Image: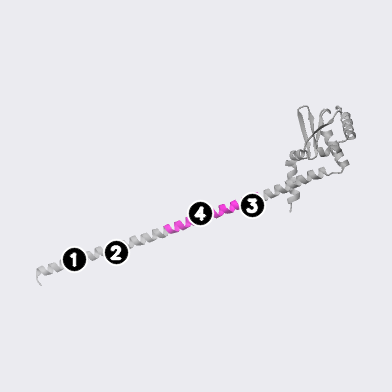
Amino acid sequence: MSGAEKLKEKILAEASRQAEAVLAEAREKAAAILEQSKKEAAAEEEAILAQARRQAEERKHRAQTIAELDARKEILAAKEKCIEETLAQVIERLRGLEPLQYEDLMYKMLLAAVQTGEEEIIIDEEDRSKFTKEFLRRVNTAIQRQGKKGKLKIVAESRNLQGGFILRDKDLEINNSFPALLRMQRDELEPEIAAILFSE
């Protein structure tokens, strides 16, 4: 083998080694890049899954909170309905009192409500038979003993009051109907009614 051939062979061998080294380095870099990409993809996948789990948990928590609020609203609405029905029953029982009991109740209510003794009394048409002349005389006599004028009178006008009465003095009206009195006392009555109805 001549010197030129040996040189050629040496150059080719060196080039082959260099090419192999470059290829090996490229393979290593490619493998490293691939490994890094896998790690990044796995980390990103884990982050996406973690975020999805958090969002799912938040949605579940929100849905549960909304369901609990809705349930509380339903319970409150049911309790409110029970209280309304109880108050309606109270009015019905007051209206259904025996005539003498009803008269006694109206007597006490009038004595407590009268300011001057000259007011007009407006009643429900159904109660007209309960407010007799004798009853009115008795009330006026008691009012005079209080130092007021005993000139109450029942007017022909009637209103749908569901029991009780309205006292009118000129332009001023005081509503003493059962529903109005219960509305005024509702804040005090409601906790007591609730305690009776919903105590365990």
Give the residue at mark 3: 71
Q: Residue furthest left?
A: 2
Q: Position of residue 69 (x, y in %)?
A: 62, 50
Depicted 187 relative to depicted 63: above or below: above
Which label belongs to residue 55?
Answer: 4
SS majority, magenta:
helix
* Residue at disc 4, secondary structure: helix
User: Which amino acid does the dot numbered 4 rest on?
Assistant: Gln
Q: Is residue 48 magenta?
A: yes
Q: Earlier in the sequence, mark 4 or mark 1?
A: 1
Q: Amino acid at mark 2?
A: Arg
Per the rendering, the mark at residue 14 is 1
Q: Nearer the viewer, mark 3 or mark 2?
A: 3
**Camera-side mark, 3 or 1:** 3
- The stretch of residues the image draws in magenta is 44-73
Residue name at image x 39 percent, y 60 percent: 39
Q: Are marks 3 and 1 in contact (CB under 8 Å)?
A: no
Camera-side mark, 2 or 4: 4
How far apart marks 4 and 1 lie (CA) works out to 60 Å
Task: Classify 10 Å Cα crowding around label 4: few (below 14), some (14-19), many (20 and above).
Answer: few
Label 3: how many residues lie within 10 Å, few (<14), some (14-19) or many (20+)?
A: few
Residue 76 included in the magenta stretch of the image: no
Q: Earlier in the sequence, mark 2 or mark 4?
A: 2
Depth check, front residue: 193 or 177: 177
Q: Which mark is residue 56?
A: none
Location of residue 16 with respect to 151 vertically, above or below:
below
Residue 34, placed above or below residue 58:
below
